[in-house]
Amino acid sequence: MDLLRGRLVNQKLAGSAFRHPGEVVSWLGAVQAQDFAGAKWAIGLRAAGLTEAAVERAYDQGAILRTHVLRPTWHLVAADDIRWLVALTGPRVIARLGPRHRYLELDDRTVARSRAALTRALDESSLTRREVGEVLRRARIQFSPERLTHLLVLAELEGLVCSGPLRDRQTTYALMDQRVPAAPPVGREEALARLAARYFLSRGPATIADFAWWSFLPLGDARAAIELARPAVPRDAVVTTTASGHAGARSRTAGSAAWLLPNFDEFLVAYKERSAVLGQGPIGPRDTLTHTVLIEGRAVGSWKAGRQASLSRAAAAERRTVSVAVAPRVELTRADWGSIRQAADPYARFLGAEVTVREGL
């Protein structure tokens, strides 16, 4: 099995028996999620018949949770994993953010006062970001939008708060102790082994540098984690290089599989070296962030979804229509366009909408 085919299979893009959002997130270990809508679709891509409503139910029920973990950004993680993941990776992320916190004058006293105010307020109910700002204002804690962001990030990385249920489609914060059952602590070596196993089983073949990038571990810890995870991590899942030729360089045949990836999808963002998917260059600054069109694991374009005007209000009420605009980055054949239109079908089922595909963003 070649590199990209192996990743498509292991990431559950090419065939999946999963039916529940929690199964997908647990398998992947963590799903990057600063774009919440995109993260929901990343889960939907990896479980047959899953809908956006089903993902949101799992989120509201606490089966999957959103918090800062691994790198300094949001991820969705399974409830069973959040405590040991935060304990393992939180201190390193906090240390990395230290210079910014000093610049923002977030000293120990300010952080402690914020923690106490959040604990009191969230003990009563989950709160939106705006409501958290009101809590800090009443506690006479000065904050700007950036200071508020970092105070919340610290609360997440310390294991005090995580996501609460959606309220009027807005995300909220809640006390982790109210969302996640208590669990015995996981030792550092066991946590390292778990993280390496999750990564290479779900994302291999990959390099040690890829794993270190994704996990935010120092290279020494990344190497140790892989050895601790043996024999759960197969030898062929860890490779020395993943460099490849230009994206789309291989010939594609009629029926080649296509996928509409959301931005920050793990198929791209989970690897430090991305040339196997994107090609050797030139690569635009948004190529690893934008919604990406894959054919047989190679990036052939980007896409953007926008609602079309319906013919009538009655038709709009019955079923909304979404237009997917595709901007190719390589020359696409008629068969390629057919594959891309087929890739829009699961997206339509996920949204519960009618989806059309057109060229040009």
Image: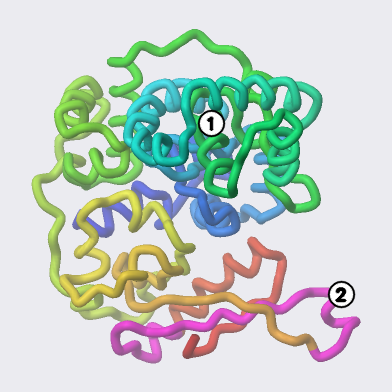
Residue in front for this viewpoint, 7 or 66: 66
Residue placed under numbered mark 2 in the picture:
317
Residue 314 sits inside the magenta stretch: yes
Q: Is residue 247 magenta?
A: no
Instruction: Determine if residue 233 is in view.
Output: yes
Residue 156 is tagged as 1
**Residue numbers of the magenta segment:** 311-337
Numbered disc 2: secondary structure: helix
Q: Is residue 165 visible?
A: no
Indicate which disc, 1 or 2, sits on the residue closer to the N terminus: 1
Instruction: Bin the neighbour count of mark 2 within 10 Å (Cα to Cα): few under 14, some 14-19, many 20 and up.
Output: few
**Quarter-of-image position of residue 124:** top right
Looking at the picture, how far across and down is residue 66, in whole percent? 57, 39
Position of residue 8 in the picture relative to residue 123 (left or right) = left
Q: Secondary structure at mark 1?
A: helix
Q: Nearer the viewer, mark 1 or mark 2?
A: 1
Q: Residue 251 location in percent, x, y?
A: 22, 80
Q: Nearer the viewer, residue 20 or 292?
A: 292
Q: Residue furthest right?
A: 314
